[in-house]
Image (cartoon, coloured by chain):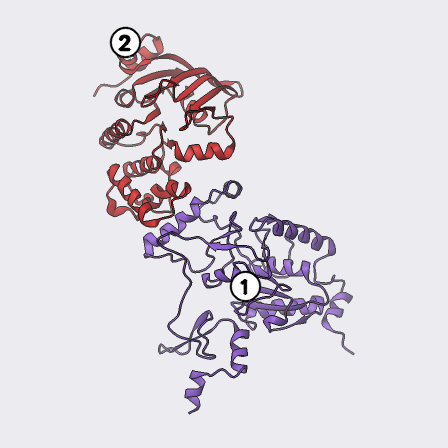
Amino acid sequence: MTMPLHTEARAAGYNFAFLDEQTKRALRRALLKAVAIPGYQVPFASREMPMPFGWGTGGIQVTASLIGPDDVLKVIDQGSDDTTNAVSIRKFFRRMTGVRTTERTEEATIVQTRHRVPERALSDDQILVYQVPIPEPLRYLEPRETETRKLHALSEYGLMHVKLYEDIARHGHIATTYAYPVMVGDRYVMDPSPIPKFDNPKMHRMRSLQLFGAGREQRVYAVPPFTSVRSLDFEDHPFAVQTWDQTCALCGAGDSFLDEIVTDDRGGRMFVCSDSDYCSRRRGDGETDPARGAAAE
Amino acid sequence: MNDTPLLQVEGLSKRFGRIAACDDIGFDLHDGEVLGIVGESGSGKTTLLRCLSALIAPDRGTVRYRMRDGSRRDVFALSEPERRLLMRTDWGFVHQNPRDGLRAHVSAGANVAERLMAVGARHYGEIRERATDWLARVEVDTARIDDAPRTFSGGMQQRVQIARNLVTHPRLVFMDEPTGGLDVSVQARLLDLLRGLTADLGLSAVIVTHDLAVARLLSHRLMVMRGGQVVEAGLTDQVLDDPQHPYTQLLVNSVLQP
């Protein structure tokens, strides 16, 4: 008789969810501090994970410190449940915890994400965990960590607008489309991780807890439920999200973030929802499919 | 005009180990007055400037500054946020090397506008207009507003740095060898510009230089430093034309005549 994978991992000496309990406690203390100071970057002792930094080790450690046997986990990468990063992280947690995983956004208690916020609104008993490559929004303008910490401490954020100014001077509009800086709780400027700015408004007063983990940079930060998250802008160049002329070629949705997919080498392309769960559910719910409908006739 | 000095320095001393870089220095600086500090390399003039501008803390002594509201405050007793606010609104610091005072990777316009945004300007059109205006005032071609300063010549970079400091209308500017490293004709134009700006804006300034010609052109009063001490002080013309101290006499006689 073969053992389930997680029992096998236990037998091999691994703790539940890979990290040892002391590490999880240290991480949870850091997370509590992060929740207490919305948008503030809290240092933590990031561990070696069985995958390289840059593959979501921060998010994975945050999830590992929170997850219990009764949790249901959903992992998405660029909105999709079936891209490499999502598949391997989901497999990692199935193997290390044995918890149930799901692709349905509303079933999950923890959603770990890279580069997207799910289209379906999250509820207050869910936690959204972001994978963050570079937690410091001021990094490219001010390389000194000692100085950026001081800027955060004194709330001196003029520099952030220098970046937006450069965008307008160069492109005529604010050309930052992802990792768009936000002001959290009217106090700290925060990098929302490389989510498209389309998702920024969803973070504002979101019902669920949002946690951010940066493994290589050894920082966690958080946005507690119902916290204001305002995207920075200029009075005469207000913040605006991306829009598309098309609707989703598969489900026809006009309100979701669309990925452009090149279909051949003759210029063929289609726009589809990046949130695979949202898209497939809409199709399952009997939404019309203009592309497929035309092909069938 | 105000009778109380803008900047009042008393008993300022700073040692680096056994070396006394500044030894018991005191002076007053009034509104609209330009003070030159001259001396040879290692005489402590740059250290003095860094102490005055609160970049480093002295071992002893006070630097009192008259704030915009008229109150006189010891700059080292200010809280850090207050001091930083002062530095980016009421004060300017022009470095000898413009690369120390500019952000190399953002455009000239953004360099000039940074202080505006740091004090809360959030209207792009207005910010840009003021940046353009200031670039024009320091005689930088406004068509180059979106170019990075690293593509500029040394003299242009220095002018951008000056615009960047003056955009918030500071009352006091510290300059460390503002014309160092520039060739003579560029120096002359920059000096012209600085003289015009300080006069137009009623700026007070403390200018450190080893170039007596620069000191004569820009400053009203002069302090001659040697070995961390002020050996002679007075009106610029008086000090340069009738030097009393042997060291000042040496300094004045050392100037090469072309």
Residue B163 x %, y %:
31, 37
Badge number at residue B242:
2
Report the amino acid beneath label 2.
Asp
Circle 2 marks a residue in which chain? B
Where is the C terminus of chain B found, in terms of image quarters?
top left
Report the amino acid beneath label 1.
Arg
Is residue A45 in sight in this rendering?
Answer: no
Q: Nearer the viewer, residue A99 or B216?
A: A99
Q: Nearer the viewer, residue B10 or A60?
A: B10
Which mark is in front, 2 or 1?
Answer: 1
Rate crowding at label 2 as few (under 14), some (14 to 19) or many (20 or more) other CA atoms within 10 Å. few
Residue A152 x %, y %:
52, 44
Report whether A108 appears left or right of B241. Answer: right
Chain letter, red: B
Circle 1 marks a residue in which chain? A
Residue at 30% from the left image edge and 45% from the top image edge: B151
Residue B239 drawn above or below residue B154: above
Q: Colour of chain A?
A: purple
Q: What kind of element bears circle 1? A: strand
Discs 2 and 1 carry the same chain letter: no
Residue A139 x %, y %:
48, 48
Residue at 51% from the left image edge and 67% from the top image edge: A78
- Contact between marks 2 and 1 (CB within 8 A): the answer is no
Residue B16 drawn above or below residue A91: above
Residue at 64% from the left image edge and 58% from the top image edge: A62
Where is the N terminus of chain B found, in terms of image quarters?
top left
Residue B216 drawn above or below residue A7: above
Residue A136 drawn above or below residue B64: below
Q: Residue A225 occupies which quadrant of the picture?
A: bottom right
Number of marks in the rendered image:
2
The residue that disc 1 covers is A114
